[in-house]
Image (cartoon, coloured by chain):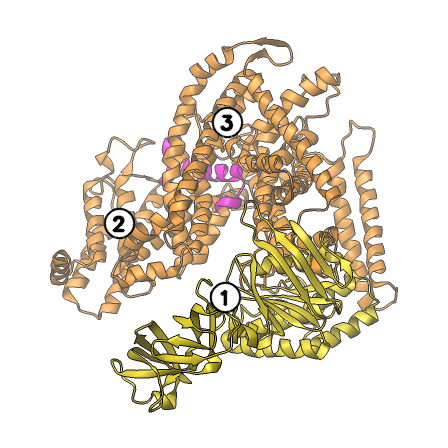
Chain colours: A orange, B yellow
Amino acid sequence: MTFITLRDSLTAHRGLTTPVVWALVALALWLLLPLGRPGRAFFPLNYDFHAFALPPGFYWLVPVAAVAIWLLQTTRLISMDRISDWQAALALSAAGGVIFFLFGTGTHFGWGALGTVLALLVSAGSALSSNSRIRGDTFVGASVFIALVFVTVFIVFPLLLVLRTAVWIDGTLTLSQFARTFASPLFLFLDNPFTEISEMGRVTTMIWIGAVTGAGLSVWRTGRIALSWRMIRPIVIWTLSGMAIGWALGIMIWGRGALPSSLLVACIAAPGGTALGFALALLGQRTRSKPLRGMLSVVSVLPFITPPFVIGFAIIFLLGRRGMVTYDLLGISPIDNPLYGIPGVALSQILGLAPVAYLILRGSLNGLNPALEEAARTLGASRWRVFCDITWPLVRPGIAASMLLATIESISDFGTPLVLGGDRNFLATEVFLALTGRYSQPEAAVYGTVLLAIVALVFVGSRVVLGAQGFTTVTGKPASGAFLPLPVWFEAILTAVALFWFVFILALYLTIFYGSFVQLWGINNTLTFQHYREFWQVGWPVLWYTIKLSAASAVPAMMLGGLIAYLVTRHRFLGRSYLELGSLLSFATPGTVMGLAYILAFNDGALLMTGTSAVIVLALVFRNMPVAIRASMAGLSQIDRSLEEASSTLKAGSGVTMVKVLAPLLLYPLLAGLIFAFVSAMTSVSQVIFLVGAGNNLATVLLLSWVEQGRLGRAAAMATVMIFGLLALILLLLVVSRRVDVRNSKKGMK
Amino acid sequence: MAAAAVSLNALTKRFNAAPPSVNNINLDIKPGTLVTLLGPSGCGKTTTLRMIAGLEIPSEGRIMIGDTDVTRMPPERRDVTMVFQSYALFPHMDVYSNVAYGLRVARRPVAEVKERVAEALALVGLGGFGDRRVDALSGGQQQRVALARALVMKPKVVLFDEPLSNLDAKLRRRVRGEIRALQQRLGLTAVYVTHDQEEALAISDKVVVMNAGRIEQIGSPHDLYHRPASLFVADFVGRANVLQAQWDGHAVQLGEMSLPMDSPLPAGPVQLILRPEGVRLARNGEAGLSGRITDLAFVGGATEVSFDTALGQVEAAVLETEAAGLCVGDTYRLAFDRSSTHILPANAV
């Protein structure tokens, strides 16, 4: 108490309000540390890049602004409200001055610039919060500014660079790179002169079939034909859409190149994975068999602990040219093996996406009110009728959400096409190959733009669909009651599917395990520890480095994610939807596009960071932040606002409230977010593959290169170690979560 | 014996381990009557209702609806509909489709469906609401849609599972009156579950008080209130003072007071059940129990007064006109109305 009064009187006396203090901190950092650095290394400090040694520039705004901010406070020439506005404006323009200088001269940023800009942002944020431009206190004001800047620098700015690189070539605005790429056989290869059939002809046939079907459907729908504009317009629309669908289907089936391949795989894998996931979710919620339920709860863990392409390479063990099933059992000769290409990629993705769909649809199913189905039954509907009339329509938004996510994941998938793609090209891999193989940034940027456009289209499309059928459930109280069991024959079919899937998955994982112990898969099956010895020599240092980087990225990802979730859910401020958009972008952008964006943004100039561990950590932080945001948001929505209000009526600021009230209650969600952030950092590959180099390779990238080189045994050894390690971690999380959950339930969780 | 509309015979339901949630229930429900299952939460009343609906399968016992044994019949084949606590309106259908659902499942002709749905909606006062979305309705309106959906099927029995618990107090009184009026007008057989004793007394032909899976008492609202069969019923239905007293076969001896009373109980120690509204201040010269006022609370129509007497705490509901001038600490003599008293054996619980 006395300390606070002391502090209050001091600040009142000397005008040392929070904005002034932080402006002075900025000034001190500006004076003490060099603004720039000569090369990639952050250390040692090089004072040739100190403010006094550099040519004059806008960075001199810093001392000017800092002194002005202080003077405004002490002299009080204008009213209090205006003082804060002016202070914020000064702090922001000083920060802008530093940034302008760095980008204008291409000076690589150093510790001084970093510290000064951050301190000035805190100063501006606290100034704006003190005159309630931002509703909240200093902590909220400062956090808003810092979150906005981070999201801009690490998500929005790099993505904008991708778009710019695609259209801004050699100093002119041009679409020539688009034209060149679209004409390239790598992108779309229609008429193959080496095949007997005419692909172009088939596509034309498909267009005609589409036109006739569309026209027929529209006539059938209206039921009559009349020659009025009102009748003709829908016919024209339906015919044209039929032609478009026919064209798309034709190209996907007979076309070659990245675009049709990616779309075709997505069209198979997204519905396939969703359907499988839905079957598993229905069973998980309603099966009469207990062991099946237990088996299904394992399902939800799988996608988190398996690097995405590991399923792909396990499939090679089983179904590949020398695969246990295809070669040894069925005797298919290696040349006739149909795995590589569309079938393999689609199969692998279906298996990988099913658990993701399972999680989404399980949540969606659990959200249903069992009384709805019971009501339908008392009104005379059989179990199957209830499923068709009630369960299915209500779970459709969940299906749409799952399809959306599965489509995006399928199109973004990088590892699987690389491992199983065969002679097919895919959009996500072409981004990488254009940049690292053909050394063409504009071409890579064009592929990136196409990917972004597809993802955006899918997103908008799903919003339209979901928006039309999002219904809030009408209930007063959550009703009790158990979910109806499924019709017996239906459950039998689903169980058969689930068992087949389970056996297949089990076989895949066992294959990896077994494959890590045999000399040369399919050729020399003698048991050996050789792969583990090689892994220990070559792989372990890389794996250890990966663990360190992942851990280093998980903590800031969690903190930043938690902060953004808190700001977005609990406060209203300018730029709130921008923060949400940023997190959505980092979640939905295909990893390869983000990787390319980071190369474009951080390979030179003011933000030079490539080649350092820092850029990998930052990439992982912003890649995994959305997971943390969602975990925190889910937790926050469980906590009644009155707890925070109680805390603030007891005179705690929002920073204190967040640390002392929210954080303990959010312990489990935060911990879960932390572990998931770590695990997904360990398993991500597509973005970081752009950023690694000889000195800082990552485990997944190394694993992928081993698979590509055909060193499957060694790869299997490393995959086994990773899977077991991550599995142990997830199990630990489950144990911890049970403990913490019990504690939380006694602590006023709503 | 007239055939019962619903008859429960030694009905028992066990979930997992003992004790059973519903334990050996026997009950006959006459056609055209409204029977309420009343009891605290967890007493098995909702489970009993769900067994009648077919949503739970009994562990033991038999359920007859009319002359049909429905014990193991699935819900969709029983001629029973239910109004759910959460209303369970289908959120993806409009009001019309909600009400029409059962008829459509039964493949009734379109014209008949239209006519019956319109009739049912008019019955609950929602004529013209057919094309509304259900989430655009108020709580009371949703409740009526749920009612119309149950009634449109013209079932043998309608089940109500705490249908009013999501409405506010005022609306609850109004809707319960409407439900009762409809039930009587249409001659419906209804089973109604509630934990609100006032609601049960207000609308029922017969009330079944349940506790811990067993039936405590079956009777008319009047019987339950004035002649509770157990201390539990006395306490659960209305408020009650319980005093230890002596019964000589003609009158209850209460200190120096003697209350004449009719009861088949043998002479001996008894428990006297005393309703608060039957406690009044004794007139001049009248014998009474002396009590000191410890608390006064004005609750609207009456004043609730707590007295400290030689036999223990006595709660009284005193009319406002008589309560004027009462002060905490004053001592009065209390007299008891004969109609508000009732005796139970001393070992009754």
Instruction: Same chain for labels 1 and 3? Say yes or no.
Output: no
Q: Chain of mark 1?
A: B
Where residue A377 appears, as percent x and y from the top left, is 70, 57
Give the mark nearest the N terminus, 3 or 2: 2
Q: Quarter of the image holding residue A344?
A: top right
Residue B230: mark: 1
Mark 1 vs mark 2: give the one in front: 1
Residue segment shown in magenta: A586-614
- Give how far apart the Cα atoms at labels 1 and 2 are: 75 Å
User: According to the image, label 3 marks what residue?
Assistant: A723
Q: Residues within 10 Å of mark 2 (few under 14, many from 20)?
A: many
User: According to the image, label 2 marks what residue?
Assistant: A119
Q: Chain of mark 3?
A: A
Mark 3 vs mark 2: give the one in front: 3
Q: Residue at x 59, y 37 (%)?
A: A296
Q: Residue at x 52, y 39 (%)?
A: A593
Asked if the residue at tag 3 contacts the one at tag 1, i.e. Cβ–Cβ closer than 8 Å, the answer is no
Q: Quarter of the image holding residue A350?
A: top right
Q: Residue at x 29, y 35 (%)?
A: A37
Image: A628 above or below A530: below
Q: Residue at x 20, y 70 (%)?
A: A78
